[in-house]
Each structure stands twice: as C-alpha cells, then as structure tokens.
Image: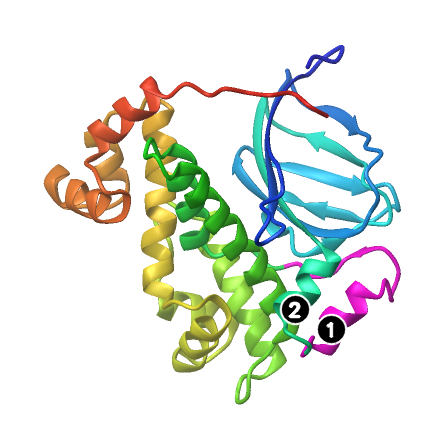
Amino acid sequence: MKTAAVDIEVQRAKAAPDTGIAWTKTRFRSNGPDTVEVVSNRPADFVFTQVPLGGSFAAELTCGTHYESETVGLVRPRDSGALFRLQRSEADIFGVNAPLEMVERWFAGKVPKAVQRILDGMGGPSLVTQAPLPSHLRISLKQALHSRLPLRTQLIEAAALQILCYQLETLSTDSSPGIAPHEVQAAREAHAMLEAEPMAPPGLGELASRLGLAANRLALAYREVFGCTLAQSAEQVRLHAACDAILGGAPIKRVASQLGYASVSSFTYAFRRQMGMPPRKWLDTQARRVNRIRSDF
C-alpha cells in the first residue's frame, strides 16, 4: 500500500486453530517523520502486543492511549485502529494478538485478577503494562522470521505465543515474593539501559551503582523479571546490535571490534552459538531471502 508519503507492506498470518494466535509483520517506509493512521473494522475482542524489529515508532490508540515501541506491553483496545508516528525512514513492526476467550482458556479457570480485569474490560481501554521485551525473545522471533526451514510457520507462531504469554505473565506476577516493587522497576530500568548502549552495555556493578541498588538485589530482580541473568541479556543485546550493524553494511571485523571482542573468530563463535551460523553466512541468507507480502489492511 502507499499513502501520500508512506509505503506500507503487510504480511499477515491467520489465527492458528489450536492457540488462536494471529500475527502481522508491517513495514513502514517514509521520509520521516510521518504519521500514518491504520483503521480496522475488526471487533476489539482481543489483546495484543507489538515488537519493533527495526526502527522505532510511537502510537496512539483510537481511545487516546499512547505507547512507545520499545516499551509496548499488553494492550486491549476499545477500537482496533491506531495512529503511528514514525521518526525514522523505515520501521518494521511485528504484532501478535489472541482472542479474549482463548486467553481465558489458557489459564484453565484460574485467571489472575489483573488479567481478568482486562478480559472483562475494566479500567477502561488501555495500555496495561509498560515493560521492555527481553532481548532473547526478540532474537528468537527474528530467527523464526528469517528461517528457511519447512516449519518456519510453526516457529513464528511459537515465538509469537511466547511473547504474548510473557506479557500476560508480567501482568499476572508483576512482582514475586521477596522482590520489592522498586526492585522490579530497577530491573526494568537496567534493561532499558542495556538496550540504550548495545555496543558496550554496562555491567551489573555499574548498573547497580546508577540505580542505587545493591548488585545482588539487582541481579536477583533482573532474573525474576526477565527469566535470564543480566549478563546473558547483555550478550543478547550486543548480538542484536551486531545483526543490525551487519545488515546495515558494516564490515564484520569492525563490528567485532566495536562490540569489544578480542578477535573476529571469538565474535564469530558467539554469533554462531546464538544464530546457528557464522555472520557472513547469516548475511548471505538475509540477502537471498525473499519476502512475500500480502497487503490486507
């Protein structure tokens, strides 16, 4: 599709019969900054979340709720439409949603109160959580989207389900026993700091000092909130930055140096461990990949 200033490509998968999960992958291209309004006649009987795969955006739901691409949580809209504000020339967005009835079924009759409020439409139409998605979930999603295996569709659906379940779980257990609310917030701020400095993410000690929290408490809270250690997340953030840099044309040797690896071989080893292939082969795979886009707004 093309508006006066923005090209839009949309790939959409129908809802899976067993999970009810449906997803879309949208690419906006513009001269930036631009605003695009997306209108839909679909009943607002679902919850959704969005993942920025490249670029960034801000959005406003029809009800007036605002959110930013890096901290999109769980959303149950009053209406399906939204207004997207694009700051860069290109933005890739992965969206995943599930019907309210299906979400209720997932909990097998034991729906947490916070989730039940959303299913019942209480509290108004709103953005429910504002938590950054862990890097390992974003990387798993990208790997699935880039897959050329026969089970690519199933891999994407699995990644989408995991992302949506993470948001539901975050809403259900916003803090765990022994972790204070301010420590949960510190863990989220620490993750945002990692994402803000992907080429050289700060370590546990530095983050703890910045946030005024004991290092062991920050480490514990981070594991509780994101399901992995802060060091593991930092490695994933660096890899995410490496993928973006390589796709942008940066030489692999320079990327390895910028990320602080002692040699190209050590960087290649880390890259292969996460992505399943060395960086040059991965780049060649992306170059050969052909996206078949179906526009069905």
**Seen from this angle, which residue lies furthest front?**
17
Percent x, y for residue 106?
Answer: 62, 66
**Seen from this angle, which residue lies furthest bottom?**
178
Residue at x 40%, y 48% (from the top left corner): 140
Residue type at tag 2: Leu
Give residue 171's mark: 2
Residue 215 appearing in the image: yes
Above or below: residue 44 compared with residue 108: above
Mark 1 neighbour density, 10 Å: few (under 14) some (14–19) many (20 or more): some
Which image quadrant is residue 284 in? top left
Percent x, y for residue 17?
Answer: 60, 48
Quadrant including the C terminus: top right
Above or below: residue 120 compared with residue 112: above
Circles 1 and 2 in contact, beta carbons < 8 Å: yes
Quadrant including the N terminus: top right
Residue type at tag 1: Ala
Does the magenta portion include 33?
no
User: How many numbered marks appear?
Assistant: 2
Q: Is residue 42 left or right of residue 238?
A: right
Residue at x 55%, y 20% (from the top left corner): 293
Q: Which residue is mark 1?
A: 114
Above or below: residue 94 compared with residue 113: above
What range of the chain is rendered magenta? 110-130
Percent x, y for residue 118?
Answer: 78, 64
